[in-house]
Image: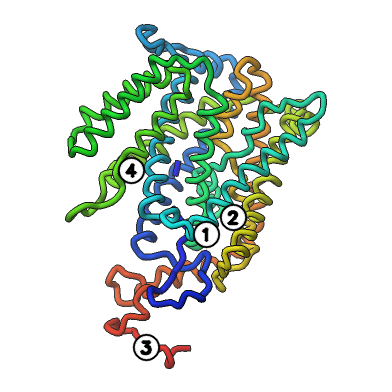
Amino acid sequence: MPVRAQEVVPVASPPSQRRQFLGLLPLPERRYLTEALRTETVGGVLLLIAAIVALVWANGWPHAYESVLHHTIGPSTPLHLDLSLEAWAKDGLLTIFFFVAGIELKREFVAGELRTPSAAALPVVAAVCGVALPAIVFALANSGGGGHPGGWAIPTATDIAFALGVLAVVSSHLPSALRAFLLTLAVVDDLIAILIIAIFYSSGIKFWALGLALAGLVLFWYLHRHGVHGWYLFVPLAFVIWALMHESGVHATVAGVAMGLILRCHREGDEEHSPGEHIEHLVRPLSAGLAVPVFALFAAGVTISPSAIRDVFTQAMPMGIVLGLLLGKTVGIFGGTWLAARFTRAELNPQLSWADLFAVSTLAGIGFTVSLLISELAFPDDPALADRAKAAVLIGSLLCAMVATVLLKLRNRHYRRLCEEEDLDSDGDGIPDVYQREDPAWPGHRPAEGRA
């Protein structure tokens, strides 16, 4: 829920040298990326399975599905936590997802692609354009009399887990630089999504609860920064902060992002891993393997019938979602990246082409998890309309996955060769050869003039 397209800029390079976009990742970043994507890929496959189960359950046994969805558990006092299972999944489990997203975002700012303005320009511009254009496409489609402009934010989100699940299913050997760009894009996208949710989908604010939630966050920060350890202390505190945020009227997932951003993500002294990295390593499998798939199980169960599919392609609101995901996301991300590269004088990695980035932009149109969440938030008083929006999200994401699969398969042989070159470790020292070729001490080193 949630890494970077790094660029190789030699320390001694002259100021006039153009920066390389989608170049070789630094080795520490590549190792972090590999571990993160391995977990997210497994989670993505589970997410696909959960979505299929939800669809089969909701269409085969609709009454049983609805009864489970609306089954209520939890105490009614003092903070009104007598919630349906659907609400626990939406407000509770997704907080774990956004907690991991908050840690990822913090790490991006201190050690990743977003740590310098020049490096951050491309993914940030791509993400902003990838949010703005789908919203504009949706607004245009719903500008007539039968439209529902309140759902403008539904097609703005990118689901990295679902995208990686698609890559795993179709066996695409996508190079690490493209995967890193996709993940960095999703991190920025998650930040924009949580801002949209906090600003546009919070109502009836109870300031006493919000104030206590903020006080809890201050205590969380104080304990963390003063070296206090112990899950038995932080987990109950985190639950209290979440419950107060939920009671306040601000969407409870905001608490997850806030706590993730508080964690320290830079190393001090002889630390092998920062506290943020350590906690992310522990929590990411819980987010990718349990929280997000269970949410999908409770959110993706919509009725799929010939009339429902016809409504998606004939009514303004669902059609706006499909067009926003398929066209808005693709054109927004690709166009924003191309323009940013032009104006920042970034040079594309010669081993890749802009067609590769276009395929990844199409893949980023998969807007499953957060789009389903916003579908419910946009139409809280009209379940039928929310279900129609969810059906459009499913169909739009499926179309993006199909188009991206075709585009990526056309280049899969080239990607496989690039991945083999990245992974080659001829001396078995655990460091790929591509990172050692310039080291004179490396056995396989050859002077620059002697290499092909």
Determine whether the residue tagged by mark 3 lies in a helix, strand or loop: loop
Identify the mark nearer the N-term, 3 or 4.
Answer: 4
66 versus 333 height, above or below = above
The residue labelled by disc 1 is 178
- 19 or 181, which lies in front? 19
Identify the mark nearer the N-term, 3 or 2.
Answer: 2
- 157 or 48, which lies in front? 157
Residue 310 visible? The answer is no
- 358 or 187, which lies in front? 187
Few, some or many residues within 10 Å of mark 4 (<14, 14–19, 20+): many
Residue type beneath disc 4? Glu
Quadrant occupied by the N terminus = top left
Residue type beneath disc 2? Val
The residue labelled by disc 4 is 280
Residue drawn at 73 percent across, 34 percent down: 139
Residue drawn at 26 percent across, 48 percent down: 274
Q: Real-space Cα distance between discs 4 and 1? A: 22 Å
Do tag 3 and tag 2 residues touch (Cβ < 8 Å)?
A: no
Identify the mark nearer the N-term, 4 or 2.
Answer: 4
Looking at the image, which residue sits at the far top?
A: 77
Residue 441 position within the rendered picture, expressed as x and y whole percent measured from the top left: 27, 83
Determine whether the residue tagged by mark 2 lies in a helix, strand or loop: helix
The residue labelled by disc 2 is 360
* Left or right for 146, reference 350: right
Residue drawn at 32 percent across, 28 percent down: 217
Residue type beneath disc 1? Leu
Do tag 2 and tag 1 residues touch (Cβ < 8 Å)?
A: yes
The residue labelled by disc 3 is 446
Q: Real-space Cα distance between discs 2 and 1? A: 7 Å
Identify the mark nearer the N-term, 4 or 1.
Answer: 1
